[in-house]
Image (cartoon, helix red, strand yellow):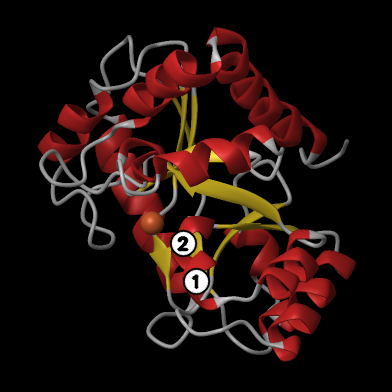
Amino acid sequence: MLDFHTHLLPGVDDGSDSVETSLGMLSHWGAGDCVCATPHFYADRDTPERFLRRRAAAWDALSAALPEDAPRIRLGAEVRYFDGMASAEALPQLCLEGTRLLLLEFPFVPWTARMLEEVRRIRRRGIQPVAAHLERYLGFNRPETLRAFAEELLVQCNAEFFLSRRTRRRALRLLQDGFIQFLGSDAHDLSDRAPNLAQALELIGEKLGAQEAKEIDEEARYWLRRCTVGE
Ligand SMILES: [Fe+2]
């Protein structure tokens, strides 16, 4: 499986608090899996340089302790939207490593034309934004707003969207409609927000058939390949 959104790296953000917690989290994925480590980046609290240094230090600490059967880990970031971000020099370095995919966290307000234009400017730079946990924004955006953004964005949804009985039906429908390209656990720890993508894929398999569960994973890997730098 490809887990596109996690807070696996120790001590960088509100995710894993130690190498031990990260190793515990890692036991939820298998050797053939790929896990994207996407710590929060907030431009109003941090500079890209400082963030990348902290991320590198956390990665050094974790990689020194990795077991042999660890999944493949790719470094990225969950970048909070800010006005003017399309011109930020460091934006390519905040993409998932080796790709031009940028995991973008939107503010929890109705999305505006100004934001849509910013997203278009990011794309004109050759960077493809992926909306993080899109399900969180469905409640306060009008369908036509979501449609306009969906033309510019790829979409990541959290495993919890499928696992929660309250939202499951909508999650499955959006998946069947081809609205979702990436799934992620958005795992932060080993308790309330533990890695749970395997359970979501199992549920998708139960409700929609094993083929559908396989197809969403294949689709994610397709976009990863397609947005690999140099291709
Ligand atoms: Fe997150």
Examine the rendering and report whether any part of residue 75 can be seen: no
Q: Nearer the viewer, residue 31 or 2?
A: 2
Amino acid carrying mark 2 in the image? Leu
Amino acid carrying mark 1 in the image? Glu
Q: Which residue is mark 2?
A: 52
- On screen, residue 166 versus residue 23, left or right, reads right
| Helix, strand or loop at mark 2 | helix
Q: Quadrant of the C terminus?
A: top right
Q: Are marks 2 and 1 in contact (CB under 8 Å)?
A: yes
Residue 87 on image: x %, y %: 75, 82
- Give the vertical position of 101 relative to 206 (above or below): below
Circle 2 packing at 10 Å, graded few (<14), some (14-19), many (20+), is some
Q: Which residue is mark 1?
A: 49
Residue 165 on image: x %, y %: 30, 41
- Give the vertical position of 64 relative to 187 (above or below): above
Residue 207 on image: x %, y %: 46, 20
Q: Nearer the viewer, residue 102 or 169?
A: 169
